[in-house]
Amino acid sequence: MNESETRGTLQPGEILNNTYVIDMLVGLGGTGEVYRAHNKVTGRLLAVKILRREFAADENFINLMRREASVLHEVVDDAVVRYYDLLESDTHGGFVFLVMEFIEGPSLAQIIKEKGPMAPADLMKIAGRVAKGLKAAHDKKAFHRDLSPDNVILRDGSPDKAVLIDFGIARDVNENAQTVVGDGFAGKYQYASPEQMDGKVDARSDLYSLGITLLTGFRGKPMGVGASLMEIVQTKMKVVDTSDIPEPLGGLIARLVAPRPEDRFQSALAVIQALRSGAPAPDSEATVIAPRVTTTPGAYQSQTGRGAVSLPAEPTSTGRKGGGLKWLFVLLLLGAIGGGGWYFGLGPGKEMVFGPQFPIEENWQFEARFAGGNLQVQGFVQGPEAAAELRSALGLATDAGDLQNASGAPISDWETRLAALVAAARPLPEWSLAVDGLNARIEGTAQDDAQSDAVSAGLRAAATSAGMTVSIALRSESQPLALADVEAAIKRYETCGPLRPSGGDGVALQATDRLAVSGIIAREGDIDVLRTALDDVLDGRAVDFNLAVLNEPVCLVDNLLPSRSSIVVNLDFLYGDREGEARDGVYYLGENPVIDVTLPASAVGYLTAFYVDQEGQVFHLLPHMARPENNLVRLGEIDGALRRVRLTWPVAEASTSQLGFNVVEPVGTNMVVAIVSDTPLFDRLRPRAESVSAFMDAFREKAAFLQLGTTMVTRRYLVTDK
């Protein structure tokens, strides 16, 4: 890249919201910019994504970014990038930015571009990881919409550490990958499913994109889809030719990229199960998926030992050689076993000869979710008849849910017991049920405590009858929570100025609203104290902390100052060895901070200025023993309409009366305070330097004096860093 290609809105060293230090620009696309950054307090490496200013007024883009933050904040899986916060910057006009986990490693697109086609074994590992990440996202009703090689990062370059990034934000960082954004669609059309082109998206759309991503990885280049919208749509409706791809990868891709959603895997869980179902003996780590055969899409084919998922392929000829011999062998076999033929060949003993009718599943699972009046189910059942009976008992349509046929149920009446658990949960307005073998867990919301108790009793009875254990986590619907009550609850825990709660409609929080708490705290551990204090108040509501961490010495002084700094008195941060201002208030080791006070030339009174460092020392800049004069009319220089008074000097000009210093360790956040008052702030001169505790003994007596309308107070944080 040349310099013009690598310049973004932010520059290395800038600090966002007094917390996030920008390290470097790592991605620059048509709609956004991604930076590597770190938290200046914890040192944790982060990614910061901002929306370009020219798109900030586009509500569609803003909504996509809000969705990415709000939904994916709840997705926690090592195969999905972790989303931490959505904030508004305090610089550059207040842009919106996302704070995320930073993944160290190349994208799949980079690997393909630099090395060409990938090994099938590596692509199978990536398929398993991405399916795992998609399941975690889909469980929270989050669909990726833009799955492509650009959005799969290989942590440390390892295929078995693949991580999904960028849900819902359309990017065009690849010049050959055109991007469409419209109603219900965000993604590169090379990788978009046929239904996605028509604005329809569900879990199966992401699985299609996964298939095309794997296809691109195997061939080393994207599949051609045409230049016009008509050509794209026509190409998407054709069956993708995968005859050049070896098994089991070829069969997996063929099933993933079926043009019709109903012919694909119906969920990410189904993909994971398919990858597991053909596993060989324990002494091999390879994953096996059965080759493509003639079958109804979604059917299972029995094989020796454990069953394997049969993936759809091209139809075979009805006159295929060897068919007659096969049937002759079957007739001879039935003749040989005589009257036992019905029992062993066609009757209840058939599994003793031919193996299980469906694949044996060791981990029987079932999930049900009820929200907005809709019930959704997925999991294992003991065949089509059992699936039909379960759907009927649950009041579902004949093809509803993602129910997979399998053998080896933990109890014979598995479906009846599932229906009983669902029936017990049905009175709740919203709930989710997860069954793993004979262990069940249900979470949900009850209308009140009485309903919670009644439903819990019913669930325990249903579980006990089935010989199952059940874990129940129900909460009653909350009443609106006034933000004023939250503010009162956290006031006693303020360690460095006021804490401001927000959320909901600005007055109260409803049951599903998130609380945000912003402000400044003295210690990182204060967040844990606040979280504990809010647990009883929030009644299950989620909370986001947007807090800047200072330190105890600075906070002690800051707490006595007026909440707002004067707009008349200003502090300028300059350099002792060069021109320019430290606009972000950050100085690095070895640098020489020069500090000036500027105020209107007509201002009169007495100027007091001091510097509070993170180590607990207060340095009096004006007045002090060697510089006792602090009457404004005798200080500084007049520059037009302003008076400029120097507080610290270049080291080369330093003397007993002119303080000058270089930044040394330890580094951290310090504070400069300037006060203009009608009369001197202190009755006598303070020493050049003293401890914060000694200073506070005298400063606390001036608390009322600082609040007078005639007293002007300003402060500015001075951050030192390595």
Image (tube, rainbow, N blue to C red):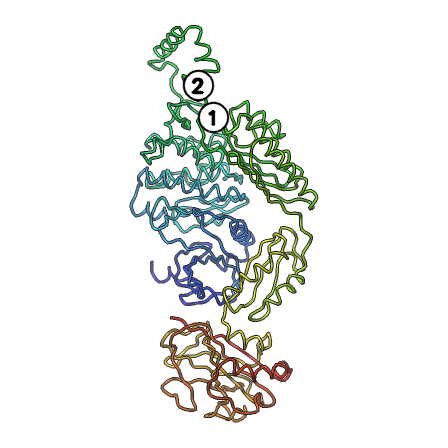
Q: Is residue 461 above or below residue 572?
A: above
Give how far across and how far down residue 42 sits, in percent: 44, 63
Q: Amino acid at mark 2?
A: Glu
> What residue do we see at 58% from left, 77% from top?
560
Give how far across and how far down residue 66 sits, in percent: 54, 53
Element type at mark 1: loop
320 or 83: nearer the viewer = 83
| Among the two numbered marks 2 and 1 on one chain, the one whose residue lies closer to the N terminus | 2
Residue denoted by label 1: 407
Q: Quadrant of residue 505?
A: bottom right
Crowdedness near tag 1: few (<14), some (14–19) or many (≥20) residues, C-alpha within 10 Å: some
Give how far across and how far down residue 442 sits, in percent: 58, 40
CA–CA distance between discs 2 and 1? Answer: 11 Å
Residue denoted by label 2: 351
Quadrant where the image shows the C terminus: bottom left
Give how far across and how far down residue 275 sits, in percent: 40, 34
Quadrant where the image shows the N terminus: bottom left
390 or 10: nearer the viewer = 390
Q: Amino acid at mark 1?
A: Ser
Q: How many marks?
A: 2
Element type at mark 2: helix
466 or 287: nearer the viewer = 466
Crowdedness near tag 2: few (<14), some (14–19) or many (≥20) residues, C-alpha within 10 Å: some
Q: Is residue 262 above or below residue 556?
A: above
Asked whether disc 2 touches disc 1, contact meaning CB atoms under 8 Å apart, the reply is: yes
> What residue do we see at 56% from left, 59% from top?
531
44 or 178: nearer the viewer = 44
Q: Is residue 672 above or below residue 375?
A: below
